[in-house]
Amino acid sequence: MPTHRPKAKNRIRKAKLARGKLSVRRPKAVPKLLVRNRQVSEISEIVRKRAEAEAAIADAQKSDARLREAIDILPQGIVFLDAEGRYILWNKKYAEIYSKSADLFEHGAKLRDTLKVGVARGDYPEAVGHEEAWINERLEKLYHPGPAHEQVLADGRCILIEERLTSDGGVIGLRVDITELKQREASFRLLFEGNPVPMIVCAQDGERIIGVNDAAVAHYGYAREDFEKLKISDVQAFDQETPWTGDQSTEERAARTWKHVKADGSLIDVAIYSRLLVFEGKPAVLLALMDITERKRAEARLAFMAQHDGLTGLPNRILLRQRLDELLAHTRRSGDKVAVLFLDLDNFKAINDTLGHAIGDKLLKGVTKRLRSSLREEDAIARLGSDEFAVVQAGVTRPEEVAMLARRLIAAISEPYLFDGHTIVSGASIGIAIAPGDGDDAEKLLKNADMALSRAKSEGLGSFSFFESEMDARAQARRRIEIDLRDAIENSVLQPYYQPLVDLKSGQITGFEALVRWPHGERGMISPAEFIPVAEETGLINAVGGLMLRRACMDAAQWPDDVRVAVNLSPLQFRVGNLLSVVMDALKASGLSPKRLELEITETLLLDKSDQVLATLHALRALGVRISMDDFGTGYSSLSYLRSFPFDKIKIDQSFVRDLGSNHDAQAIVRSIISLGMGLGVTITAEGVETEAELSCLRAEGCHEGQGFLFSRARPNAEITQLLLAQRNARGAQSTLVA
Ligand code: C2E
Ligand code: MG
Ligand code: MG
């Protein structure tokens, strides 16, 4: 059909043009110019429009591609449906989430239809049994979107669905795969519920409680429903320094302890560890509550014990020092004075030893009670040592106020006590130091008050004494002695002098007492009465004692066989534990017969009657060594000590001998000691015999031996041999011995 050909050709051309597949060519020759002109402009118009449309389409295609690219990189699934529920656009993630149904997604396909197919093949387990209703509900939700909801897929994955209506009545839907989150939440739940540690989940504000575990319910005792309506601040005791606020950081909370109230009203100390987490899909704060009440209590107990005395409950030295320093810092600003009264019980040791520790303890408690009731609230009190107490008097203006308090305290303590039927009389001596004059720190004040106490004691029991700077000078002198004494020991400056012991019947020398002498380079001869106490305080006495033993045994080994040597022992030498071997070594090295060695001990050694001391004494005596009781009569309970050990000799203290001529009592005492000694079969020696009158009196009483300046002072070994020779020549005339 040739006539139709041009028409058909034209149609095809038009269609090709419309699709942009054909370029426009100028038409061939036209008969009339006008017609031709109009046709040309029409065609140009068409061409222009076409080009515009083509550009618009290209643009649309470009932005469509861009949109696709954009939504494809989103981590969530996204879908666009039109008002009729037809698929318009969806991203890769959406197809991935619904991978089972992805084959059904098609541009223009209806959601209802894909759901139908999906439900029928079991892609949505939630729908099983009520398929139609499920689909309807799903579609209903789609066009009336509410809050996000979850959907479980056939493979168990959990999808969070959120939908919004678009302006053209369509729907934009978001899908998030929350499977992992759900799993985590499930394992958290498991951990949370079954955890033995009480745990609470709070809302994001960190305060409102939204979940509690069984352990928390059990621990706090609140009913779960009530508990979950509270705020953390509701379980808080109201005496907290810093109240609980939700915006405290985790570290801030963990660093603190909180006081919580349990349902029964009791308080507990709690340490709280918190963490941010997602709970039931929402951000929340997990609080683990550690009940540390017991630990706190134990810590407090330990802290108390470290700072207090177990017996009296008073602060100890550590706490006193701390409080005193605080007080001093405060008074430095106010200009007030602070007094420290260092108090020591008189004869506490004797009471403890004779009546037992139980009574001693009662006495200390009794003293504490009396001290407390004699003090004002602002005064502090502490127990520093066995029978040492300290009182801190604040706000002092004049020393007389401190003296008044000291008198009052001594009087209060000196009132008799009645314990278990025993009436006990104690007393106290007090040393006083006042800040800032006598020191401006606790350490110095206590030291100076202690020094003043020594002075008070030396002035007689029951007195008090203020610190004076000259006491400090004395203490320094003591330190000097210590330093020089170390030197003297090292350089063998110390040496024994020997004072004869004379048989009062025959006038013959029976032996010598070795007395230590210290010729000091600058100070001349220093008396043992001055340096032996320092040696005892510093432990140097062991070196001094050992040295004296060795030297005395060496020297005596050169004397005639019937002449003994006596060496003084300090109680401290017994404490070290090697005294027996020190003595044995000295005997062995010198070759001196043990029978010729006498060891002088004082009553203080027997004060505590320890088994170790007695065992050492017996062992020494078993060697053949003689044991003498020195300075007899000066101790607290001299007679009882005689029963504790079989002494070979008793040396009557020189204070009794001194008074022999003038004092009747002294004579009676000396007489009874002599007869006691005779009764016990023990040698009696009188010390400090200075006059003929004393000598004849002692002779008349039947005293065995004498020692004193009347016979001779202590002399260096070089003179001893001569002395012994002279004695032999003089045949017993005592006068030859008088120095
Ligand atoms: P002590 O053991 O009672 O020694 C007797 C002291 O009386 C000696 O004093 C002696 O010199 C002194 N004396 C002796 N006869 C008379 C006298 O007629 N009149 C007076 N007024 N005094 C007399 P010394 O040597 O000063 O010793 C004092 C104390 O030092 C000794 O008393 C003793 O307790 C101690 N001592 C001395 N040497 C040693 C030693 O080597 N070791 C130990 N642990 N203590 C020693
Ligand atoms: Mg002696
Ligand atoms: Mg003596």
Image (cartoon, rainbow, N blue to C red):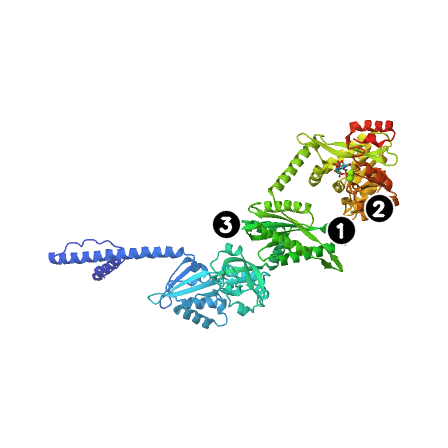
Which element is circle 2 on? helix
Q: Residue furthest front?
A: 662
Give the left or right position of residue 93, taking residue 454 as reference: left
Q: Nearer the viewer, mark 2 or mark 3?
A: 2
Q: Nearer the viewer, mark 1 or mark 2?
A: 2
Look at mark 3 in the image and give the residue it sits on: 333
Q: Quadrant of the C terminus?
A: top right
- Residue 335 drawn at (x, y percent): 51, 49
Q: Residues within 10 Å of mark 3 (few under 14, many from 20)?
A: few
Q: Residues within 10 Å of mark 1 (few under 14, many from 20)?
A: some
Instruction: Establish if 725 lies above or below 168.
Output: above
Look at mark 2 in the image and give the residue it sits on: 672
Marks 1 and 2, the one that precedes in the sequence = 1
- Residue type, label 3: Arg
Is residue 20 at all visible to an observer of this figure? no
Residue at 35% x, 57% y is: 67
Residue at 58% x, 48% y is: 434
CA gap between label 3 and label 1 equals 47 Å
Look at mark 1 in the image and give the residue it sits on: 353
- Residue 295 drawn at (x, y percent): 61, 57
Instruction: Establish if 695 lies above or below 212.
Output: above
Q: Which mark is residue 632?
A: none
Whether ligand 1 has any atom under 8 Å from the Cβ at mark 3 is answered as: no
- Residue type, label 1: Asp
- Residue 734 drawn at (x, y percent): 84, 32
Residue at 60% x, 59% y is: 293
